[in-house]
Structures are given as C-alpha cells and as structure tokens.
Image: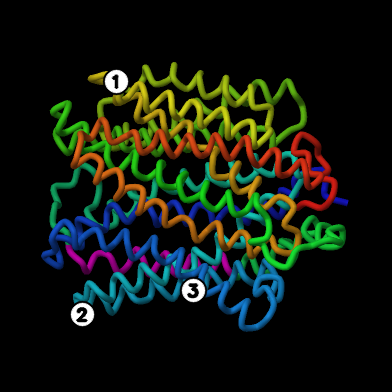
Amino acid sequence: MTPQKTNWGQFIPLITVFFFWGFVAASNDILIPVFKEAFDLSQLQSQLVSLAFYIAYTVGSLIYLLISYLTKGDLINRIGYKNALALGLGISALGTLLFYPAANLKSFPLMLSGLFIVALGFSLQQTVANPLAIALGPVKTGSQRLTLAGGINNLGTTIGPLIVSFAIFGSASSTNTHMSIESVKIPYLILGAVFLLVAIFLKFSSIPDKPAAIVESDEEASSSRSSALKYPQLILGMIAIFVYVGVEVSTASNLPAYMEKNLGFLTKDVAPYISLYWASLMIGRWTGAVEAFTDNMNWQKILRFIAPYLAFGVFLLVNAIAKHDLTPFYIYGLIILVLIGADMASKGNPARMLLLFSALGIIALAIGMTTDGMISVYAFTSVGLFCSTLWPCIFTLAVSGLGKHTSQGSSFLIMMIMGGGFISLLQGYVADVTTIQASYVVGVACFAYLAFYAWRVTQILKTQGIDLDKEKVSGGGH
C-alpha cells in the first residue's frame, strides 16, 4: 500500500539538499562581480559563471542516461535512491575542493570547473530527490511535499547570498569593498565539508534505497512501457519544465534593465525588488505546502494565511538586516491575498493549480506590459508568486504513472532546466528589436503553453486510469 501519511522522519533530512541547491545557485550572483574584478573580465565573460553552472544539469542528466543505457539498466534503481543522493553530494564536494587551487593559481577556468562539478552533483541529486519527495507520502499531497521542499530551496536563495557576501566583504556596515579571489576559498571549502557530512548523515538515515510507492508502481504496471519517453505526459512535461524555468529566470533577469531604463532606478536600488521576486517564490511555496502538514481542513485554512505572511516576514527581515527601506513593500501584502485565493481554489489538484497559476501569470505579465511606474514593477515581481508552485505541479504530473521509469523520467525533466538560459536569450533578443516591457510577451507564451499542458495532461492521465483527486492512483503510479 502507498503510505497514507507523509513520512517526516525521511522527508526532513531529504530537504536539506533542496536548501543547498538554492544556497549555491543564488550565491553565484555574488561570485560574478568578484570574478569579474579579480580576473578582469568583460560582462559577457562574467556570465560564464551562470552558463557553467546551469549547463551542468543537462550534462549530468545525459551522463546518467548514457551510463544507464550502456549498463542496460537504470543507474539509480541499481544503486538505490539513498546511495545516489549521497553520491551526488560527494561529487558536489569534489567541486568545492577546486576553489582552493583555483584561488591560489588565480585561474578563472578552474573556478568555472569547480562550479560545473558542484552543479553536476546537483543534477544527480535533483534526479533522485524530486521523485523521492513525491513518493514519501500520499499521492494526493505529492506536489505539496515538493512545494514545501521548494520553499526550503528558496530559503537558501534568500540567505545564501548574505552569508557568502558576509564571508567575502564582512558586515553590511563594513567599509571593505575589496573583492579578493582569495576570500572565496574558505566559504566553499566549508560548504564542501558540509556536503560530505550531509552525505554521511543521509547514508545512515531511514530514507529508503527504493521508495515503497515506486516499488508498488513497478509491480502494478503489468503493461509497463519500454522507456520513460513512451509516456506522453513526460514528453509534454519536458517542454513544460523548459518553458517554466525559462519564464521564471527571464522575468527576473530582465527586470533590472526595465527598472533602470524605463523608471530611472539606480542599479543599487534595484536589488530589493529582485530579492522580492525570489522571495515571492518562497511565499508561494510555503503557502502551497500546507496540505502536506495536516489533513485537518480547519488547520489548513489557518495555515494558508499564516505560511505566506511568515515567508513575507522572512523577506522583510532579511532586507531590514541589509538596511533597505521597507516602506515600498508593505503594499505587496495585498497581492499575496490573490495567491492565497488561487491556492484554495486549486484544492490541491496539481493540474488545476497549474492551470490557475498559469492564467494568473499571464494576467500579471499583461498588467506589467500595459502599465507604468510601481504598478508594473509589482506586477512583474508577482510573477514569482505564480511561478512558485509550477515546478512541483509539472513534475508530479509528468512522472505520474511512470513506475520503474520514474528516475529516468526525472532525469529527462532535470535536463530541461537549460530552458532558463535559452528563454532568457530569446527575451533579450525580443527586447532588442522592440522594448524591454514588450519583450515580456515571451513569458506570456510560456504561461500559455503551461495552461495547455495542464488541460492536456489531465486527459492523458485519465486514459491511464490515474485520478489525481484521489489519494490512491489506480493503474499504477508513484
């Protein structure tokens, strides 16, 4: 039987890796200016930091699939989920070790290699951890558990840059503005040591080598197909992940240019609004995760209001510590009510949630494109709220019914994270030939596809006997 309650003893240690992904990815924004000055790089060259990091996800997925193909068996199924997770952390730890010789030799390529290997380990971790988070409890709340894990990820994106910045520059009141490549060594060596400690901890934790829910799915799927690519929900889901990561990243990456060029903001004054965008994902994910905590409907209603404003409070606290003026952000509390209403209307169904939030994403971008001043800024930042739960919704829908091909399907989905780079480039091109504000039509197109996927995948899963409104999935599932 699929477990009827979330196994918190297994889930809590699992989500530590989600924290690391956010911590490191957001900290790259601190490394870019440090590397740019230390290595005398152009702006284009400095962006190789992001390229090296995100392309590793695709390369890691391809390596995993190649090994599985050559050995004629799924690698993760063979070594076990827990072992694969520990292996991924070990690979990431090796990457952090390269920061020491890279700093001593003042080698930019070696620094990029270190980041690439860290993300290579993350690729394997993501392939394991995402379906594992879904499997450690009832099918119905699988996307909520993944949403909660994403909220922990965003906690990492919120505090990661602060910690790395403190390690390099000292406190916010410090007059130190010198960016030394030598100062990067210690933080990342410490991070590597933490990776290894967590790997050992997970190795001896109660996390299963193969979740019972996936074993059960393997046994029930008598008409199992030969490959994950034989499932249309996965094929369409891969495109969905590509455009979702694309609209999430491109919305934020083009916002500074819009605020500087159209609204006259200084570069230093844009940072709190970028922080608000990424905090919006945390706000939405904490809201979407409440069903994973309790089955009591009354408590769920209360937590749906407490969770988002608690996350908003974290954002305000972080910016207060950074000594930013908080006055412009209080009004954002009203926009959060729209998120709460949409979350309640979705009733926990991942397809319905995907449809509703995609529609709201289109509305937010349309408002941002057709208004001026702070209204447009808040509209664009609110896209973070409506992107917040899309990853777990897409992931849950895409791997539903895959059974023994779940980890393979997960790897294909992780591969599509590269959409963050390609969609951003596309929006940049559209901005060059039109305007930055008009270029957000690219994001509208992305959300339109996601709405289509929500509608189409519901039909596909029904033909396979899968009903996501029910706790137990018939005809095979997680």
Residue 67: quarter of image: bottom right
Label 1 element class:
helix
The span shown in magenta is 180-199
Q: Position of residue 475 (x, y in %)?
A: 84, 50
Q: Which of pointers 2 and 3 lies earlier in the amino acid sequence?
A: 3
Name the amino acid, label 3: Ile
Q: Nearer the viewer, residue 314 or 2?
A: 2
* Callout 2 secondary element: helix
| Label 2 to label 3: alpha-carbon separation | 22 Å
Mark nearer the N terminus (1 vs 2): 2
Residue 50 position by quadrant: bottom left
Give the spatial CA distance, label 3 vs label 1. 47 Å
Rendered residue at 39%/64% (across/down): 55
Q: Spatial distance from mark 1 to mark 2, Cα to Cα?
A: 51 Å
Pointer 2: what residue?
A: 105
- In the drawing, does residue 228 fall left or right of residue 336? right
Is residue 55 shown left or right of residue 136? left
Quick check: marks 1 and 2 in contact, CB under 8 Å? Answer: no
Residue 381 horizontal/vertical position (percent): 36, 30
Relative to 158, say whether 316 is above or below.
Answer: above
Q: Residue at x 69, y 26 (%)?
A: 300
Q: Which residue is mark 3?
A: 91
For the point 71% across and 76% down, which residue is it? 78
Residue 44 magenta-drawn?
no
Nearer-the-camera pick, 245 or 307: 245
The rendered magenta stretch, by its main secondary structure, is classed as helix
Closest to the camera, between mark 3 and mark 1, is 1
Marker disc for residue 370: 1
Q: Which residue: 83% across, 59% down?
A: 221
